[in-house]
Image (cartoon, rainbow, N blue to C red):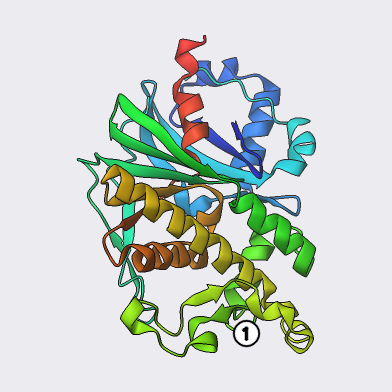
Amino acid sequence: MDIGGTLAKLSYFEPTGITAEEEQEVVEGLKSIQKYLTSNATYGSTGIRDAHLELKELTLFGQRGNLDFIRFPIQDLPTFSKWEEIKTSQHCKRFNGQAECYHFANASEPERCQKMPLNLDDPYPLLVANTGVGVSILAVHSKDNYKRVTVTSLGGGTFLGLCSLLTGCESLEEALETASKGDSTQADKLVHDIYGDYERFGLPGWAVASSFGNMIYKEERESVSKDLARVTLVTITSNIGSVARTCAVNEKINKLCLLETLRVSIRSMNLLAHALDNWSQGQLKALFLEHEGYFGAAGALLGLPNFS
């Protein structure tokens, strides 16, 4: 299990094809937990098993089995931990040969934007940005040569916290769903609201000049309540794009792998890809991983033999 500041993530390995003798060795409590975890896609009102990410028939610690991925808000951890006591002492090669890495082609053109697989067999150098509660960016030059280059407190936790205050959203999924339906252009002050187009300085009219900038006007505040989640998401992703671009220039790296909370929805991924494309003028490529968010939990699972 990987217990973050916003979400707790669980990677659960379920062996298949075990012998009758091996099955008898499994305690009844573990059997009931296994049945509960693998037969449900949701747990209570907020827990989710990402069934589309399940890895079937992979080899882990010499056994064949399935690897499941479950997440839930950190505030629900006490409830979850009442019955979740999994003791498994079972190595995972590359995820079943599936393309783990992808990017968005034409990120700045919504009508042409599409998800594309990407070969990351030779990944170095790259920046890694964990956009969880806050944002931490690392420059990774090789497997053993890496350093943290910057942090910002404006991350996924900021997005969820502001959405909870501004819109009453009670979960990350609800906040992202609300953001996907909103329009940020009325609440944000755009370049064309001030200058018109300012192309000679590289500022198109549609670019955001001031996040929430139009909220100084009472008449604007009265008409944008349903759009505030979208404004918040655009604000956070744009800030991440700006910070990442600065790191990329300083470190002379043109690849950025984004991990964690804000990646949960297609909308947030598109906005992050768009922000990076815009701030770097196409020089910095945003990369995403299919099982991001679960690598901490999977790493803990793989490390079990070292602690047994």
The residue located at (71%, 41%) in the rendering is 74
Residue 263 image position (x, y, % from top left): 50, 55
Is residue 186 toward the left or the right of residue 14 in the image?
Answer: right
Q: Classify the position of the N terminus by image quarter.
A: top right
User: Can see residue 224?
Assistant: yes
User: Could you tell me the amino acid type at mark 1?
Assistant: Gln
- Is 253 in front, or is 15? 253
User: Can see residue 100?
Assistant: no
Residue 100 image position (x, y, % from top left): 33, 48
The residue located at (67%, 32%) in the rendering is 33
- Does residue 281 lie above or below 12 as drawn? below
Residue 187 image position (x, y, % from top left): 65, 80
- Does residue 63 lie above or below 251 as drawn? above
Q: Quadrant of residue 302?
A: top left
Neighbour class for label 1 at 10 Å: few (<14), some, many (≥20)? Answer: some
The residue located at (50%, 68%) in the rendering is 267
Q: Mark 1 sits on what residue? A: 186
Residue 146 image position (x, y, % from top left): 34, 30
Q: Quadrant of residue 61?
A: top left
